[in-house]
Amino acid sequence: MDNEATESSLNLTSMEMLTMGGFALFFGWMFIVFYWLFCEFPPDLPVSTRDLSQFFVFAAVPVGYIVLHLLAKNPKFNVFSRPMRVAESLCAIILPIIALVMYQGAVIPLAIVCVANFLIGLSAAAIKLSWLDVCSRLETTRYSRVTGLSLFLGGLLFTLVSFSPHFVQPAFSIVFILASMAMLSYATANAPRNDERAPLESIANTWRFTKEIEPSFFMFGVVFGMTFVYLFNSGSDSVLLGLISTLVGSLAVAIISIADRQASITTYQRALVVVTVIACVLVPFVDKTWQLVLSCVVTAAWAMFMAINYGYIVRKCVIAWEAPLFRQAPIRLMVPALGFAVGWALAAIITASYGAHSDAFMYVRLVVAVLLVATIMVFFPAKEHHLVDGSSPESVKVQTTVVSVDVSEKELFEKRCAAVAKLFQLSPRETEILGYLAKGRNAAYIQEALTISPHTVKSHIYNIYRKLDIHSPQKLMDFVEEFPLD
């Protein structure tokens, strides 16, 4: 098993590499149009006004997730449909086209720029959701490796583009997003969809969120939003350093996902809280050089937070695989995006009122960091709210209650599984998997729990159904539950 897990951690399938390439192009586009272009556009405007115009981008992202969540309630809605891809592509290239026109000396009204910003934020939400859905259909369980490497490669693409002449950088962003959309079309047409994959039209409500995680993710977003405003207000060199810092955080996630895939999301989150809060607490008391360094540390933590969050969203959606990811995940993605927008708005208001690097700005960042700690202390339970396999605490409590009240139920279930395995001559591994199937677990869950490849899981499941001459999960569960014991 260990050899198989190690091999799985090091090998990349062609579809996984395609997904990382397309997702990386998306991130490269996002870095350019979300942050980099605003170092110069709109021109001849004070920083506070540009902060406000850029806010429309970040306000549109959570709005986009809410709209996608509502649309996903309709089984006919498909995020991969051609009209969606065309609309996303058009919205994604509006701002780079405006930038190219401005480089030719044209004057574009600020209102038009704000509308373009809002449209580009909507498209970013839909495209990111689509790529995460593609990630959920890969033959891998190391989703943080995919998201971490994609973010790293996207940051690398941005870094290379940032050293090119300014007037060609918007053109690069157009090429990036159109290439990403083309690869998305190919990936959605060729990604594996076997019997365990949820049909696109399924709207089953398979994933319940926990009240513990949303407040902390929101506060993380607020801290990160304020940090990016600080970098943005410091000039293009600071923005460049901050975005380059994301390479460190995203690469760290990819490495960790290979070395320690069983760590829980709460382990990472607690580490990120410590790093982020220490950096924010120190900012008001150091000089500008160290303020920049600490802000870059926070952007590296932001990259880690994003990559880890995306990876665990994919994992949990696969575990609860009765509906596709694009129907399950929008609200979870909306929470930190909303926090980022609130943080950006708060920082923009302070900038307009007191100045870009006023003491008020620094102390508000400190207060927000303290609020993040308070939120974690209040809402973080003693037990993990998201286990490695993506289970919610509610389900864990239910299982614990059943076992403690009536242990014989568990013993009876195990005896039935053992009796079925003996009668139908199941192998030890098939017997182990039978126990999961009899509890209603799907192939993705078993693959995650036993750390074996998707092909191995499918092969064992096929053999179990063949030996028992059963052809549906429900019939297998009923068969085991009703199996007579001597």
Image (cartoon, grey):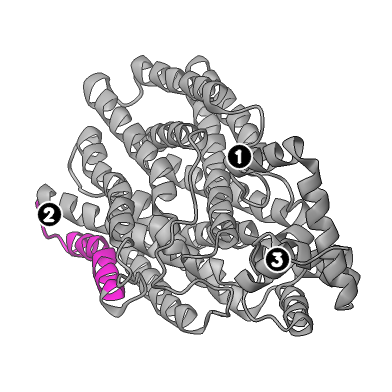
- State whether residue 423 is above or below residue 206: below
Measured Cα–Cα span from mark 3 to mark 1: 21 Å
User: Which residue is labeled 2 in the image?
Assistant: 112
Q: Which numbered disc flags the more N-terminal residue, 2 or 3?
A: 2
Name the one closer to the observer, 252 or 420. Answer: 420
Q: Quadrant of residue 94?
A: bottom left
- State whether residue 112 is above or below residue 104: above
The residue positioned 29% from the left and 68% from the top of the image is: 88
Q: Is residue 43 left or right of residue 135?
A: left
Q: Quadrant of residue 106?
A: bottom left
User: Dot 2, how many residues are within 10 Å of its Cα: few (below 14), some (14-19), or many (20+)?
Assistant: few
Q: Which numbered disc flags the more N-terminal residue, 3 or 1?
A: 1
Q: Secondary structure at mark 1?
A: helix
Q: Where are the magenta residues, as a range?
A: 84-109
Q: Which numbered disc flags the more N-terminal residue, 2 or 1?
A: 2
User: Which residue is labeled 1 in the image?
Assistant: 393
User: Which residue is labeled 3 in the image?
Assistant: 437
Q: Position of residue 477 (x, y in %)?
A: 67, 66
Q: Is residue 417 left or right of residue 471?
A: right
Name the one closer to the observer, 372 or 170. Answer: 372
